[in-house]
Image: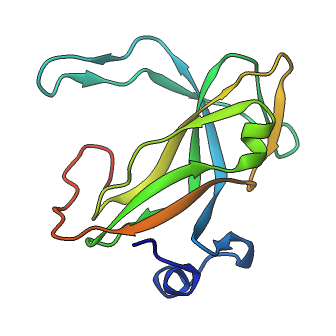
Amino acid sequence: MILGEYVLRDLFPDLDEDQYQPAGIDLKLDRVFRLEGRGALLEGDDKRLPEYREVETEGGVFELEPNVPYVLELAPELEIPEDTAVLFLPRSTLLRSGVSVHTALGDPGFRGKIRVLAVNHHAAPYRIAHGERVVQAVFLRAEDAGRYEGDYGR
């Protein structure tokens, strides 16, 4: 079952009014990082992320160069309830503009900043302002779920 706007208003009462949607909440762009160097996902728990270099804004606007992967850090930080999982979906304006957003599942009990991968597939740079809504979080009830025990939350 997808949690609707009125349930989400109770769970997340401190959001801006424009972040509440009928079937989710919008997350806003906070920081942008460019990936540098090597990463690895090897046997067992041997995983190494590439280095993240923060991209500075120009007058509060980030510029995404064509065909470069960027990590977008979103606001607000989320605390996902233990009986809920979250699907993160791109806002359609980005897709219509040639910018893909790649996401993962938010597990029950995850607490922390949400980061997604974005790639500008257009031939020209794409500009996006700090604080713009870029991802919609859709919350689903997860029956008999375990709790997030990963490396990326707090």
Q: Name the residue at the left extreme.
A: 44
Q: Report whether 43 appears left or right of 113.
A: left
Q: Residue 35, how many percent across, how many down?
A: 54, 21
Q: Name the residue at the top extreme.
A: 38
Asked whether the viewer can see residue 76, the reply is: no
* Residue drawn at (73%, 21%) of the image: 121
* Residue drawn at (72%, 48%) of the image: 92
Q: Residue 113, how many percent across, how many down?
A: 46, 53
* Residue drawn at (15%, 69%) of the image: 144
Residue toward you, 68 or 83? 83
2 in relation to 64, above or below: below
Q: How many marks?
A: 0
Q: Report whether 79 appears left or right of 138.
A: left
Q: Name the quadrant containing residue 19.
A: bottom right
The chosen color scheme is rainbow
Q: Name the quadrant containing residue 62.
A: top right
Q: Quadrant of the C terminus?
A: bottom left
143 in relation to 36, above or below: below
Q: Residue 120, how many percent across, how many down?
A: 72, 26
Q: Name the residue at the front extreme.
A: 1
Q: Residue 69, how many percent across, how many down?
A: 60, 23
129 in relation to 118, above or below: below
* Residue drawn at (69%, 16%) of the image: 67
Q: Quadrant of the N terminus?
A: bottom left
Asked whether the viewer can see residue 116, the reply is: yes
Q: Report whether 10 appears left or right of 141.
A: right
Q: Report whether 39 appears left or right of 25.
A: left
116 in relation to 153, above or below: above
Q: Name the quadrant containing residue 95.
A: top right
